[in-house]
Image (cartoon, rainbow, N blue to C red):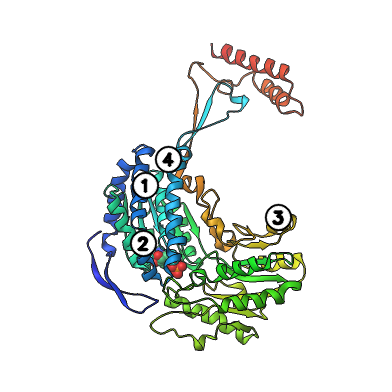
Amino acid sequence: MEELHTKWEVYSPATGEKIAELDETPLESIPHLYTKSRQAFQTWSKLPIKERLQYLKRLRLLMVNKMDEIAEVISKDTGKVKIEALVADIMPTIDAIKHIEKHAMKALSRQKVSTPLMLIGKKSYIDYMPRGTVLVISPWNYPLQLAMVPILNALAGGNTVIAKPSEVTPLVGMCIDNLFHEAGFPEGTVQFAHGGKDLGASLTEQKPDYIFFTGSVRTGKIIGEVAAKQLIPSTLELGGKDPMIVLRDANLERAVNGALWGAFTNSGQVCMSVERIYVERPVYKEFLSLLKEKANSLKQGTRLTDDIGSMTFPAQIDIVAGHLEDALNKGAILESGTSPNDWKTGQTYFIPPTILSNVNHSMKIMKEETFGPVLPVVPFDTEEEVVRLANDTEYGLNSSVWTKDTVKANRVASQLVTGAVTINDVLITVANHYLPFGGTKQSGIGRYHGEQGMRIFCHEKAIMKDNGKKNSEIQWYPYEGKYTKFLSLFQHYFSEKTNWIQFGKEYLQLIKISKEKRK
Ligand code: ADP
């Protein structure tokens, strides 16, 4: 940690109790962070991948030992129930480390690629070169995973990292900082700046070599602009308004259970959560009544027996209330939950799981990201109609299709303009590190996870090697006498059926001319 000042009081959103007093990283220390990062890069980038992975392994084992402790910190800081901290934040992070340990060597080592016949005698390779200092700015909803996964991928690629975790969940930020420290990463390899927007903005202005941002569309656009002005490559992982499409032949019980979890896990504060459901009319009533019944049996609180925790960020409550009020004013029917006036949010921030019917696309609840435990349900009649409605949004992160008919599932899935589609499931693509993760439209730019998740933090260097024995190449100077030969060579090579005899003749002629002309 750098020199610190300003005391920072942290309260648990679920209990209202003060849980910590912390210090912010002063803005003045930012240049120093960058200097240290650039120095550390000189050594870290040169370590063999195998040695870098040893540090990641140490971190993994440390996290396995401290799993319960970390879950406690996340739960306190975010208000989410502890099981969600464990299953949806800690586990995917540790799994990401395991994935990197297994695949980094292959993904980041020199790759041999083919060389076309025209370049006969040469060999071609791609090298993955670390970029330098990677800036990772992360949000509060999955504060461990969304900070650590990009940090770890960047480190594996030989970069050094400066990370700014969300100011809304600073205890988790400190916890991550301590974990890297305890795992023994070399000084300056991964550094943390603890603080808010101003700190984030100042960090982006110091010319990092890559920016990896996860957060709101609004901030993503600001960061994208800063990055564009400096030509800094970046990944932007932003919001979603994910549709769930239930066809008449779906396993309704599973679809209802999936909808509940997809919409209400983490109090709906999930970029990939189910934010709207379209149900084919013949099963709409049955679906809605089962959904209401099951929603009413969910327990809210912070005990291990509870299902839904609190909201994490007080300001988010106003957005959710705004969307709900707008819908209710325009005729939406409250099927479960209460109107915002009856929410008991004072010191603590619980919003009851809320289901709405009689909704349409003139309402914010159907078009803008709500990021809360509110679920609008709409009947539809045709596949064409539901695809149009599902795509009627500025976002395109995730979506789901529920049916027993594989042909129908694939047909609908192929028409959804989203970065991922789950079939008879929700959210879960994010848990498979072999799959790319990212959005279309306003949901972001870029993908990570998997091999590409490591490679985005490297610039690809094309290498082509000649054995250096020939004194010249046919396309080098002088050109005299070569034009018609090249013309004939290309015509024979690229025509419908390659004339290999003629091709060989022209090629040898060109070599001969090259040799003669050089004399
Ligand atoms: P969310 O509400 O989902 O956390 P935000 O976009 O507000 O989304 O914040 C995500 C992260 O971006 C946080 O760490 C926040 O401090 C940081 N941040 C906010 N504004 C800026 C900015 N202008 N420049 C850099 N980082 C910022």
Residue corresponding to mark 2 = 68
Residue 17, quarter of the rendered image: bottom left
Asked whether 227 or 283 is in front, the reply is 283
| Residue type, numbered disc 2 | Asp
SS label for mark 4: strand
Q: Quadrant of ligand 1?
A: bottom left
Say which element carries label 1.
Answer: helix
**Under tag 3, what secondary structure?**
helix
Q: x and y percent of residue 200 in the render? A: 37, 63
Q: Amino acid at mark 1?
A: Leu
- Is there a contact, CB below 8 Å, between mark 1 and mark 4? no
Circle 3 residue:
410
Q: Position of residue 315 (x, y in %)?
A: 44, 77
Looking at the image, which is closer to me, 230 or 431?
A: 431
Q: CA distance from mark 1 to mark 3?
A: 38 Å
Q: Residue at x 59, y 22 (%)?
A: 120
**Which badge, 3 or 4, comes first in the chain's sequence?**
4
Identify residue type, mark 3. Answer: Asn
Q: Which residue is mark 4?
A: 129
Q: Earlier in the sequence, mark 2 or mark 1?
A: 1
For residue 391, what is the image quadrant? bottom right
Mark earlier in primary sequence (1, 3): 1
Circles 3 and 4: CB distance less than 8 Å? Answer: no
Residue 126 seen from this side = yes
Type of residue at label 4?
Met
Residue 400 x, y percent position in the rendering: 63, 62
Q: Mark 1 and mark 2 in contact (Cβ < 8 Å)?
A: no
The residue where tag 1 is placed is: 56
